[in-house]
Amino acid sequence: MKLQELATFFKISYQGDPDFAVNGISSIDNPIQNTVLLVSKPKLVNFLTNQSYAFLIEEKELHSPLPKGNFLLVDNPRVIFAKITCLFKIESSIPKPFIQDNFKVKLNHGYNFTVGKNFKYGVGCKIGNNVIIEDNVLIGDKVILGHNICIHKDTVIGNCVNIDSGTVIGSEGFGNVINSRDEWEHINHLGGVTVGDNVSIGSNCCIDRGTIENTVIGDNVIMDNFIHIAHNVEIGNGTAIAASTAVAGSCKIGRRNLIGGMVGILDHVSTVDEVFISSCSTVFQNIKKPGKYTGFMPVTLHSNWKRIAFWLSKLDKIMRFKKF
């Protein structure tokens, strides 16, 4: 769409070339020409000098005239960003059954499965029963897919990867924003998933695709069953994650991290290399030094816990009056 058409469609103001062609969305970290960039921080205004992009920005945050360029000026950029993702979302075609005999022999299997367009695979692959592979999926050599797996569009899987039954890779991420009517606007996720070499993913795991950039699982990563990896997460090489762990959106996990079972990691948290997180811990903030980390209260009688909770709620007052 042209810049003026985009502004008219959403009933917002614009500045710049009305005929500037907008072909999609990209991120500030990896901008692509002729796309919309969401600018969430006013300090990035100095970056807005290239006319190859259209910048979605909150006008009231600017305290000086805009530099030369193409701008969409709104009250709530994230809401408009969510709506723009709907325009550029490309639905995957309905996968069709692949029943060619020679194809089955090459993949060393005898089951039914379905694939979309532009599916490419390496040598020595095995695919189980009822597997669905959508458009633009690339898998490397010696990849094993168990039964009842769904690989969504724009997924790249490396060599020697083992994915167990029931896992979903590339599902829609959980990104939403409240509009002026207190209704949820869903942010459509336009990225994909990249899985490295020598990766093992257990049963019933969910790995969401990225909002714009890809969700990335590094080389030699091992994952247990029932693990959720949210959109835009990056997991470093050699990391191991135990069952029932959830990693929220845009986290960056370092290399060779050991993450115990039932760990919860909040969004936008990063960890350095060589970190061990104890089971059942909750990670609220960045971990900047290697080592073992634990964040939970041991189980106790409920009557004891009520007394502990009472005193925890009073700690701020106690510290105010305590003299050192």
Image (cartoon, helix red, strand yellow):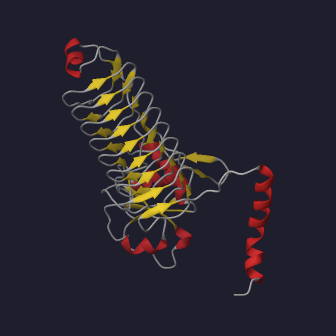
The residue sitting at 45% across, 28% down in the picture is: 166
Does residue 40 appear left or right of residue 296 in this picture?
A: left
In the picture, the quarter occupied by the C terminus is bottom right
From where the camera sits, is residue 11 visible? Answer: no
Does residue 73 appear left or right of residue 216 in this picture?
A: right
Does residue 169 appear left or right of residue 311 in this picture?
A: left
The residue sitting at 62% across, 52% down in the picture is: 178
Image: 114 above or below 320: above
The residue sitting at 28% across, 24% down in the picture is: 126
Looking at the image, which is closer to me, 202 or 129?
A: 202
Q: Residue furthest bottom?
A: 324
Image: 129 above or below 188: above
The residue sitting at 30% across, 17% down in the picture is: 98
Looking at the image, which is closer to me, 112 or 2?
A: 112
Image: 142 above or below 261: above
Q: Position of residue 12 (x, y in %)?
A: 53, 57
Looking at the image, which is closer to me, 191 or 280?
A: 280
Q: Position of residue 289 (x, y in %)?
A: 42, 68
From where the camera sits, is residue 208 visible? Answer: yes
**Quadrant of the rendered image containing residue 291:** bottom left
Q: Position of residue 270 (x, y in %)?
A: 44, 61
Image: 323 above or below 213: below
Does residue 139 appear left or right of residue 39 in this picture?
A: left
Q: Position of residue 81 (x, y in %)?
A: 49, 53
Looking at the image, which is closer to me, 274 or 71?
A: 274
